Image (cartoon, rainbow, N blue to C red):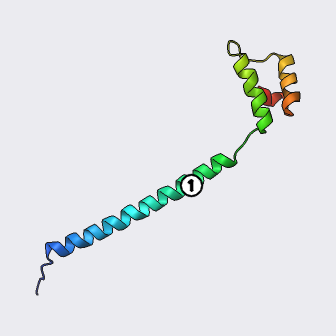
Amino acid sequence: MKFFLIPFQVVHKKFLSIQTQLKQSTCDAVMILRSRFLDARRKRRNFSKKATEVLNEYFYSHLANPYPSGEAKEELAKKCNITVAQVR
């Protein structure tokens, strides 16, 4: 039975090749996941732009007590074209 010794340089070259492929495939996978995550974030919008502006305006003008009363909730809901439950 004969044993052949594989030179260190051959093994090292193969290792570097596999390492480079692994890095590239990992980088590609991360970029795909990042793209999908950002696309999902861009598409999601709970309220219209106008409703968001109205609600933010109320919040920042009432920072000391940002919790609207029942009447204020109804008024905000009408302005934003959303339900009172959504104002909560």
Q: Which residue is mark 1?
A: 35
Task: Tally the numbered discs.
Answer: 1
Label 1 crowding class (10 Å Cα cut-off): few <14, some 14-19, many 20+?
few
Q: Position of residue 48 (x, y in %)?
A: 79, 39
- Disc 1 element: helix
State which quarter of the image contains the C terminus: top right
In the displayed structure image, the side of residue 11 where residue 27 appears, left or right: right
Indicate whether 47 appears above or below 85: below
Residue at x 76% of width, y 31% of height: 53
Viewer-closest of 5 and 79: 79
Q: Quadrant of the N terminus?
A: bottom left
| Left or right of residue 24, residue 55 in this image | right
User: With respect to residue 11, does 87 lie above or below?
Assistant: above
Q: Is residue 88 above or below residue 81?
A: above
Measuring from the top left, give residue 21's x and y in whole percent.
Answer: 37, 67
**With respect to residue 74, does 64 lie above or below?**
above
Residue name at image x 87 percent, y 17 percent: 71
